[in-house]
Image (cartoon, rainbow, N blue to C red):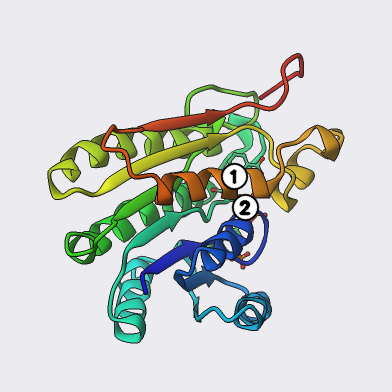
Amino acid sequence: MQTAIVTGATRGIGKAIALKLTELHYNLVIVGRTAKLLDQIKSEIEKTGGRCLTVVADLGQENAPGHIMEKTVSHFGQMDVLVNNAGMSHSGPLLETDMETWDKVHAVNARAPFFLSKAAIPYLKVSPNPVIINIGSVVGFKGYRDQAAYASSKHALTGFTNVLAKEVQKDGIKVHLISPGGVNTEMVREMRPDIDTEQLIQPEEIAEIVEFLVTRKGKGTIDHLYIRRQSGLAFD
Ligand SMILES: NC(=O)c1ccc[n+]([C@@H]2O[C@H](COP(=O)([O-])OP(=O)(O)OC[C@H]3O[C@@H](n4cnc5c(N)ncnc54)[C@H](OP(=O)(O)O)[C@@H]3O)[C@@H](O)[C@H]2O)c1
């Protein structure tokens, strides 16, 4: 059985992706800081007959990527799909954004996917269907006011994914970036309480795109999927 790691799987998009990959019969490694929520999702997965390992880790910490990979491989013996989903947002004008906040946002959103991917590559090289999926954002291409730290971290993730995809293509490792607009999760409900949640993309829609990416057989490369909400709204 193949093994998938999903970071930020305690809620929102990551949880929906973890449940979808369980349906697809992957062993799941779910990562987040909140042990209680990870345990609840592990029971949900096990009730459906799936196998799950929880790893409590703060991706803002330097040692987290190595720790996650070590736990995964010692428990399941292999690593096939890495979904770098965990992320944190920050909303505030540039003049009110301090260096500590900028560093934390970049550590979680850009540095952790970089070093988790690096740690995963030796295992992905021997996988029958190796895939890395990075969850970016429309702000990895655009800029919205008051999102300088968040947008620059997601731009960094976009750039990194572009390079990674080319570097590991020769090893048969498929690398994809999914860049959603507003998705109905705690993150966007906190940042934009003014938005009607029915107008948002649902987390399950992102999980369906992940299903497509890990099950497709084609040799053609899909670098990037940019997912807009319905048109005519103030932002994507
Ligand atoms: N919602 C949107 O509109 C939207 C749009 C575009 C892109 N995205 C991206 O989609 C991804 C998932 O977002 P979401 O909307 O599902 O957000 P969410 O509901 O806030 O969930 C964020 C997840 O990341 C985890 N996380 C946050 N900081 C972490 C840290 N330091 N270490 C480990 N895990 C951490 C959280 O778990 P713990 O709190 O347990 O650590 C949680 O599981 C993020 O990368 C986000 O930037 C979201």
Q: Is mark 1 within 8 Å of ligand 1?
A: yes
Q: Secondary structure at mark 2?
A: helix
* View extreme (bottom): residue: 75
Residue 100 in picture, x, y percent from top left: 50, 51
The quadrant where residue 40 appears: bottom right
Q: Nearer the viewer, residue 82 or 100?
A: 82
* Residue 161: % across, % down: 33, 39
Screen quadrant of the N terminus: bottom left
Counting residues from the N terminus, which is met first, the one under dot 2 or under dot 1? 2
Q: Residue at x 47, y 49 (%)?
A: 109
Neighbourhood count class around disc 1 (C-alpha, 10 Å): few under 14, some 14–19, many 20 upward: many
Please indicate whether residue 2 sits to the left or right of residue 143 in the image.
Answer: left
Residue 13, numbered label: 2
Location of ligand 1 given as a quarter of the image: bottom right
Q: Could you tell me which quadrant the C terminus lies in?
A: top right
Judging depth in this view, the residue of 166 and 86 nearest the camera is 166
Q: Which residue is mark 1?
A: 206
Question: Do callouts 2 and 1 mark residues in contact (Cβ within 8 Å)?
Answer: yes
In terms of secondary structure, where does tag 1 sit? helix
In whole angstroms, how far apart are the C-alphas of marks 2 and 1?
A: 7 Å
Q: Is mark 2 within 8 Å of ligand 1?
A: yes
Q: Residue at x 63, y 57 (%)?
A: 16
Q: Amino acid at mark 1?
A: Ile
- The residue lying furthest to the top in this view is 232
